[in-house]
Structure formats: C-alpha cells, structure tokens
Amino acid sequence: MSDPLVSDVVFKWAGTIITGSVAGTWLIYDAYKLLRLAKADGTDPTVHDKRFGYSIGVLIGFIGVWGCLRFHGVV
Amino acid sequence: MVSTVVPIPSSTPVEKKIVSPYNPANAVTASRFFCLPFFVWAVHNDHRQWATLFIIICGLLDKVDGLVAKIFDCRSAFGEMFDAITDGICYGFCLIICVAYGWAPVIPVVLILFLGIVNTALRGIYAKRAGRTVNYKSYAMERIVAYTGYLIGFATADMEVAFYFWLFLPLMTVIVIHDAKRMLIDAVPGATR
C-alpha cells in the first residue's frame, strides 16, 4: 500500500465535503424534526428525549459546518 | 448456543421471535474489529490518508449493520448491546492510538474516555433496573457517537483537531448528565423488578 492515496488538495477537499455535507444535512434534518415536535406533549419522556437529541444534532451540525469554514480560513 | 428472545410487533402480543446472536448483522458489527490492526499500521507508518480511509470504513460498517439487521429481520437486544460495545471499543481504541502518536490532544481524549466509561456503567445500571438485556435509547448519544467517529477522522486528517476535540467535551458532558438522570432516576418502561 502506498501513501498518499490522493494529492493533499484532493484529500483536504474530500475531508471538507464528507464533513460539511453530512453536518449541513444533519443540521437541517434535525432542525426540521425539532420543529415538527413543537406541538408535541413535552411531558412525554420520549418526546423530551427526542427534543434533546435533535437539539444536540443541530448543535453538532453547526459545529461541523463551522469547523469546515475554519479549515478553509473562511471564518 | 445462546439465543436472545425479542418481542416482535404483532396483533398477538405474546408472540415472540427467537433471534440467534450468530446472524448477519452481528457479523457485520464484529467485522469492524478487522479495521483496527490496519488503522494501527497506518498511524504507525504516518499514512494519514490510509488511517482516515480505515476509520471511514469502520464508521460505514456501523451504519451497514443496522441496515443488514432490517433486511434479514434479525434485530435483537443483544445486537443493540453488541453494537454499542463495539462502538466504544473501536472508537476508544482509535482515540488512544491517535493520542499515543501525537495526532490528538491528550486532555480532551482522557476526559472523553472517562465520560464513555461513565456512560457504559450507567447503561449497566439501567439494564439492571430493567431486569433484562436492554440498551437505553438516547437520541443525543447516537449523535455524539457519530461525532466521535468523525473526531478520529479529524485527527487522522489533521483537520481543525483542537477546535473539534475541545467543542466535543461540553456536549458530551451535558448528554451524560441528561442520560444519567433518565437512566438512574426516571422510571424504566416495562421494568421487571
């Protein structure tokens, strides 16, 4: 097996795309699911767990996108 | 051969389905361990791209096992536990390797591993409270585990390592505290003791 598999530029962009696309999709999808639960009964433990989980998902998605922007010196 | 009994959705609630632990989904889960020696080889030889590839394969197999369980209809409580344990061993081991070779910061990794051990202990207590083999379903923990897989990728790809590792810690701390309350204090659905 040889190293590197691809050039540094391709590797850097592959990492960015893999992270940014998943984090961005995750952020939007969990935000959508969080909005759908807006009217659900918050006293139900499952609803509470889902809200908490989706909120964490939104945060993680945001961190993922932010990190990609930092990696490319945008922010 | 030890088997796990899991209830299946049915109009007759007493109907049960026997699922052998030697099923395709668990085989996929177990195959994740084969990524570890290759990962160590790549890190030891400073092959960052290969190391990243092996951790991606390990992460993808984590997604595939759930899919295989659905296709072959072999979901079981044991499978869920085995999946969670495999996550902990594979990701914990890779994090330690990254620290050992100076690819990841020591303090965040030590704290992440500590929180992981605390979470595992809490799940053990929860299963004891439930009186059966059961894995507490935490939507937040599912997400942070995926983030853990990415953390190793960030370390191997040398991609904003300090940023991603230090931001991970407060998130995981909040999740473990939240889940601790749910597992230790709140009522366990369907507890037998």
Image (spheres, coloured by chain):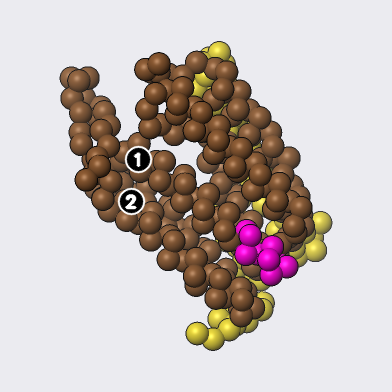
Chain colours: A yellow, B brown
Marks 1 and 2 close (CB-CB < 8 Å) = yes
Residue B61 quadrant: bottom left
Q: Total marks drawn?
A: 2
Please tell me whether residue B125 is drawn above or below residue B151 in the rendered image: above
Magenta residues, start to end: B95-103
Residue A52, horizontal then vertical, whole percent? 60, 29
Callout 2, which amino acid?
Asn
Query: Which residue position holds label 2?
Result: B26
- The magenta stretch spans residue A16: no
Callout 1, which amino acid?
Phe
Residue that appears at 51% across and 53% down: B89
Residue that appears at 57% across and 18% down: B185
Q: Is residue A32 visible?
A: no
Query: Which residue position holds label 1?
Result: B78
Residue located farthest toward the bottom when viewing the structure as drawn: A2
Q: Residues within 10 Å of mark 1 (few under 14, many from 20)?
A: many
Q: Main secondary structure of the magenta part?
A: helix
Residue B14, horizontal then vertical, whole percent? 20, 20
Q: Are marks 1 and 2 on the same chain?
A: yes
Q: Chain of mark 1?
A: B
Residue that appears at 45% across and 26% down: B128
Q: Nearer the viewer, residue B24 or B9?
A: B24
- The magenta stretch spans residue B98: yes
Task: Determine whether the residue tagged by mark 1 lies in a helix, strand or loop.
Answer: helix
